Amino acid sequence: MTTAAPVRLGAIDIGTNSIRLVVAEVESDGTYRVLDEEREMVRLGHGLFSSGRLGAGTMERGLEALAKMKAIVDGFQVAELRVVATSAVREASNGRAFVREARRRCGLRIDVIPQEEEAHLVLQSALRHFDLAGRSVAVVDIGGGSMEVVLVAGTVVDDVHVLPLGAVRLSETYCKSDPLKDRHWRKLKRAIDGTLADGIGKVPFHPEVIIGSGGTFTNLGEMVKAEREGQAGKVHGYALSRADVVHLLHRLRETPLDERKRIPGLNPRRADIIVAGAAAVARLAKWLGGHQILVNERGLRDGVLLAMIADRFDTARATPVRPKDRLEWVRAFARKCRSNERHCEHVATLAGQVFDGLRGPLDLKEEGRGILTAAALLHDVGYVINHAKHHKHAYHLIMHGELQGYSAREVELIANVARYHRKAFPRKSQANFARLERADRRLVRRLAGILRVADGLDRTHTQRVTAVTCEPGPHRLRLALTAASDPRVEIWDAGRKAGLLEKVLDASIAFRWAGAERGRKVASAPSRPRLRLAAS
């Protein structure tokens, strides 16, 4: 059997502070070894955050660095090269001009990636190099212009935040003295804390560990290692504590720039921005409630390389067995979140029966059935984060769940239906609901109303109610339940959750147990006044 020859790939990351290259040789099974790495600290974003433009001098340095890296890549005869640009080029008013000039002078096609893709690529690097299974983790990357924070529970993404807390941006905006005076330190600290409050808000869980990539984390690791062990060096996977960072931050704040440049482990060319970077790490760790920090020396360019490998080699993909259809993707994701499979499957069955019975009264199309089924299978995935507000966690998990076979619109509908399977009704004051089209908001209300009742009909998770039949009438709906034994708990809970469905139907809902004692009635929850559906 002939083994395919290894393939050489290259990735270049154009950041606000540095431009980095990695060249790797990839085997057919997706494993790879790094052949060469190169880094140039060109400070492409210098002055950007006050002027809104890339300076002529920094653009020229950036183009020279790219030309050098292109020559290295050509020397290795790589089969494919991907070049990505992040915050600086993305935000600069003349960023497109830089991209055009790189194409003309260096023959490089630059992909200016959105913030969400940047965060996703950083996460892929962390997943490759660290075992996140069963742990609550914050994956963080700090560049010159921005900070990406990905909250992960057992390898499942709960939320992604992209914040304007890059080391260069903060330094140019707030570090107006050296050493940093108390009043400037207070402004810097307030700015970071305010951005964290607005951008992240109350965290859904306190991560057991923070995995940090980017030059700030690497230099903090090298300084701590030099202090502990008497020498710096590679720090990939090196563990710091939040106390280590806070202690180091106090020292950096009080040390003039010329002396900072001589601190063992600190890159002298990063000495002018390390105070702001360290402050961002310390304040973030406090905000998240995290105490342990692991350094990931790979970061974004490694994520780009891994994405290229995944595109070329199926064996490099994370899922060993590919689901055959999109509902299997949904079920696989639910298992990944350790959801109660029997309960969710049963709720999906009951929800489908109610959906079929209300097609006419609610003007439901076949598309809605698929959305409802997926939402029912996933409605409890938020428990992987915690019980409290698990419906809100479900929304974020589904939005970041990479459900294959579904369009972005369908994923958002599934996430919203799952989000509203309990507690508050959908309202346009809620951002996730407000951004839907009017017709989609109407559909979410109807499907979430059905899901609430179906979830209530398996309150005890014993699948006591085996079937439900709709008996609609003028301004009323009776649900006939098939059950081998008295389902009074299920009827009570379904009646308690029936308010949204009553609202969209403009009808009261009652329940009838049509089981072993056919015709026996069981009272539902106290009826509520009928409410007409408000305009979308």
Image: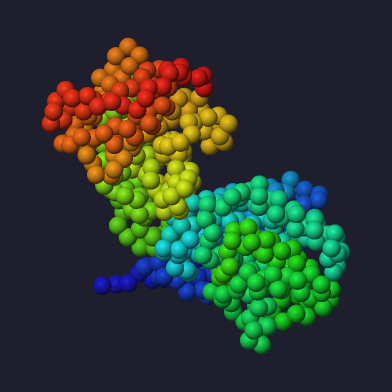
Closer to the camera, 343 or 509? Answer: 509
Color encoding of the figure: rainbow
Point 44% across, 43% down: residue = 391
> Where residue 455 appears, x then y in whole percent?
33, 37
Q: Quadrant of the N terminus?
A: bottom left
Report the side of 485 relative to 527 (left or right). left
Q: Residue at 61% across / 49% down in the picture? A: 201
Number of dots carrying numbers: 0
Q: Which quadrant holds residue 298?
A: bottom right
Q: Is residue 129 left or right of residue 64?
A: left
Look at the image and tell me whether residue 89 can be seen.
Answer: no
Spot occupied by residue 476 in the image (x, y as percentages of width and height): 33, 16
Q: Is residue 331 above or below residue 407?
A: below
- Visible in this render: residue 193? yes
Residue 352, percent from left and from top:
28, 32
Q: Which residue sits furthest top?
A: 474
Point out the residue furthest to the bottom here: 230
Of residues 12 and 411, which is closer to you in this image?
411
Q: Residue at x 82, y 72 (%)?
A: 254
Q: Position of residue 137 (x, y in %)?
A: 51, 61
